[in-house]
Amino acid sequence: MNEPEEMRVDRWLFAVRLFKTRSQAADACRNGKVRLNDAPAKAAKPLRVGDTVTVRQSPITRTLKVVGLTERRVGAKLVPDFATDETPEAEREKRRLAKRGHGDSSRPTKRDRRLIHRFTGNGQA
Protein backbone atom coordinates (compact mmCIF):
# COMPACT_ATOMS: atom_id res chain seq x y z
CA MET A 1 0.00 0.00 0.00
CA ASN A 2 1.34 3.45 -0.91
CA GLU A 3 2.23 5.66 2.01
CA PRO A 4 1.84 9.41 1.35
CA GLU A 5 4.96 11.59 1.65
CA GLU A 6 3.14 14.27 3.65
CA MET A 7 -0.28 14.91 5.12
CA ARG A 8 -2.20 17.50 7.14
CA VAL A 9 -1.41 17.72 10.86
CA ASP A 10 -5.06 17.52 11.91
CA ARG A 11 -5.66 14.39 9.83
CA TRP A 12 -2.62 12.66 11.33
CA LEU A 13 -3.60 13.60 14.91
CA PHE A 14 -7.04 12.11 14.28
CA ALA A 15 -5.60 9.01 12.57
CA VAL A 16 -3.27 8.18 15.48
CA ARG A 17 -6.12 8.57 17.99
CA LEU A 18 -4.97 11.69 19.85
CA PHE A 19 -8.39 13.24 19.21
CA LYS A 20 -11.80 11.60 18.84
CA THR A 21 -12.74 13.73 15.82
CA ARG A 22 -10.84 15.53 13.12
CA SER A 23 -12.62 18.77 14.01
CA GLN A 24 -11.31 18.49 17.59
CA ALA A 25 -7.79 18.11 16.17
CA ALA A 26 -8.32 21.17 13.93
CA ASP A 27 -9.65 23.18 16.91
CA ALA A 28 -6.57 22.24 18.95
CA CYS A 29 -4.36 23.51 16.11
CA ARG A 30 -6.40 26.70 15.83
CA ASN A 31 -6.13 27.32 19.59
CA GLY A 32 -2.35 26.93 19.62
CA LYS A 33 -2.24 23.60 21.45
CA VAL A 34 -0.34 21.81 18.68
CA ARG A 35 3.28 22.50 17.72
CA LEU A 36 5.17 20.98 14.81
CA ASN A 37 8.95 20.92 15.22
CA ASP A 38 8.65 23.58 17.99
CA ALA A 39 6.62 25.97 15.82
CA PRO A 40 2.86 26.60 16.10
CA ALA A 41 1.02 24.37 13.65
CA LYS A 42 -2.08 25.23 11.68
CA ALA A 43 -4.40 22.33 10.83
CA ALA A 44 -3.38 22.21 7.15
CA LYS A 45 0.38 22.35 7.82
CA PRO A 46 2.10 19.47 5.98
CA LEU A 47 3.55 16.75 8.23
CA ARG A 48 6.36 14.40 7.18
CA VAL A 49 7.97 11.28 8.64
CA GLY A 50 10.60 12.30 11.21
CA ASP A 51 8.75 15.42 12.41
CA THR A 52 8.07 16.00 16.10
CA VAL A 53 4.53 16.92 17.17
CA THR A 54 3.81 18.41 20.59
CA VAL A 55 0.19 18.42 21.77
CA ARG A 56 -1.06 20.15 24.92
CA GLN A 57 -3.80 17.93 26.35
CA SER A 58 -5.05 19.18 29.69
CA PRO A 59 -2.87 18.21 32.42
CA ILE A 60 0.06 17.14 30.19
CA THR A 61 1.97 18.04 27.05
CA ARG A 62 2.51 14.98 24.85
CA THR A 63 5.47 14.75 22.48
CA LEU A 64 5.25 12.37 19.52
CA LYS A 65 7.72 11.48 16.79
CA VAL A 66 6.11 10.78 13.40
CA VAL A 67 7.13 7.29 12.27
CA GLY A 68 4.57 6.79 9.51
CA LEU A 69 1.68 8.47 7.73
CA THR A 70 -1.74 7.02 7.10
CA GLU A 71 -4.85 8.31 5.37
CA ARG A 72 -7.19 6.27 7.60
CA ARG A 73 -7.73 6.16 11.36
CA VAL A 74 -5.84 3.21 12.84
CA GLY A 75 -6.70 0.89 15.70
CA ALA A 76 -5.07 1.49 19.08
CA LYS A 77 -2.73 -1.49 18.64
CA LEU A 78 -1.41 -0.05 15.35
CA VAL A 79 -0.62 3.45 16.66
CA PRO A 80 3.06 2.55 17.43
CA ASP A 81 3.53 1.91 13.68
CA PHE A 82 2.81 5.60 13.03
CA ALA A 83 3.90 7.46 16.19
CA THR A 84 6.54 7.06 18.88
CA ASP A 85 5.66 8.58 22.25
CA GLU A 86 8.59 10.70 23.46
CA THR A 87 6.69 12.39 26.30
CA PRO A 88 9.06 13.13 29.21
CA GLU A 89 8.56 11.06 32.38
CA ALA A 90 7.67 14.20 34.39
CA GLU A 91 4.67 14.81 32.09
CA ARG A 92 3.56 11.18 32.39
CA GLU A 93 3.66 11.50 36.17
CA LYS A 94 1.31 14.52 35.92
CA ARG A 95 -1.17 12.31 34.08
CA ARG A 96 -0.96 9.56 36.70
CA LEU A 97 -1.62 12.08 39.46
CA ALA A 98 -4.53 13.61 37.55
CA LYS A 99 -6.13 10.20 36.96
CA ARG A 100 -6.02 9.47 40.67
CA GLY A 101 -7.93 12.67 41.22
CA HIS A 102 -9.75 11.47 44.32
CA GLY A 103 -8.61 14.31 46.59
CA ASP A 104 -9.95 17.36 44.74
CA SER A 105 -13.53 16.18 44.08
CA SER A 106 -16.28 17.99 45.96
CA ARG A 107 -18.56 14.94 46.02
CA PRO A 108 -17.77 12.14 48.47
CA THR A 109 -17.29 8.68 47.08
CA LYS A 110 -19.66 5.90 48.01
CA ARG A 111 -17.19 4.69 50.62
CA ASP A 112 -16.75 8.20 52.03
CA ARG A 113 -20.51 8.62 52.24
CA ARG A 114 -20.89 5.36 54.16
CA LEU A 115 -18.18 6.41 56.59
CA ILE A 116 -19.87 9.79 57.11
CA HIS A 117 -23.22 8.09 57.80
CA ARG A 118 -21.60 5.65 60.20
CA PHE A 119 -19.86 8.52 62.03
CA THR A 120 -22.91 10.79 62.27
CA GLY A 121 -25.43 8.02 62.91
CA ASN A 122 -27.64 9.14 59.98
CA GLY A 123 -29.02 6.73 57.44
CA GLN A 124 -28.57 3.00 57.20
CA ALA A 125 -24.91 2.45 56.36
Image (cartoon, rainbow, N blue to C red):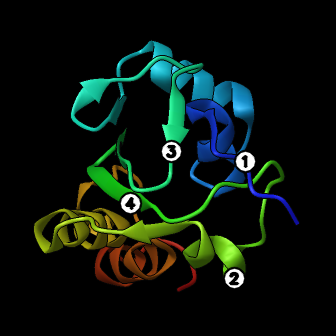
Residue that mark 2 sits on = 77
Q: CA distance from mark 2 to mark 4?
A: 17 Å
Q: Are marks 4 and 3 in contact (CB under 8 Å)?
A: no
* Marks 4 and 3, the one that precedes in the sequence: 3
Nearest-to-viewer mark from 1 and 4:
1
Give whichever of discs 2 and 4 has the lower sequence position. Answer: 4
Mark positioned earlier in the residue sequence (2 or 3)? 3
The percent coordinates of residue 111 (x first, y second) are 44, 82
Judged left or right of residue 16, residue 40 is left
Counting other residues with Cα less than 10 Å from the Cα at mark 2, is it few (<14), some (14-19), or many (20 or more)? Answer: few
Residue 45, relative to residue 11: is it above or below?
A: above
Q: Secondary structure at mark 4?
A: strand
Q: Residues within 10 Å of mark 1 (few under 14, many from 20)?
A: few
Give the spatial CA distance, label 3 vs label 1. Answer: 9 Å
Q: Which residue is mark 3?
A: 48
Q: Could you tell me residue 90's position as x and y percent?
A: 11, 68
In front: label 2 or label 3: 3
Frontmost residue, 78 versus 70: 70
Hey, which residue is sitting farthest left in the picture? 90
Looking at the rendering, which quadrant does residue 122 occupy?
bottom left
Given the image, on which type of amino acid does mark 4 rest? Lys
Circle 2: residue type: Lys
- Please tell me which residue is depicted at 59% across the width and 44% down the height of the picture: 13
Q: Is residue 75 left or right of residue 25?
A: right
> Under tag 2, what secondary structure?
helix
Of marks 2 and 4, the one in the foreground = 4
Q: CA distance from mark 1 to mark 2?
A: 21 Å
The residue where tag 4 is placed is 65
**The disc labelled 1 sits on which kind of residue?**
Pro
- Around disc 3, counting alpha carbons within 10 Å, would you say few (fewer than 14), some (14 to 19), or many (20 or more)? some
Contact check, label 3 and label 1, Cβ < 8 Å: no
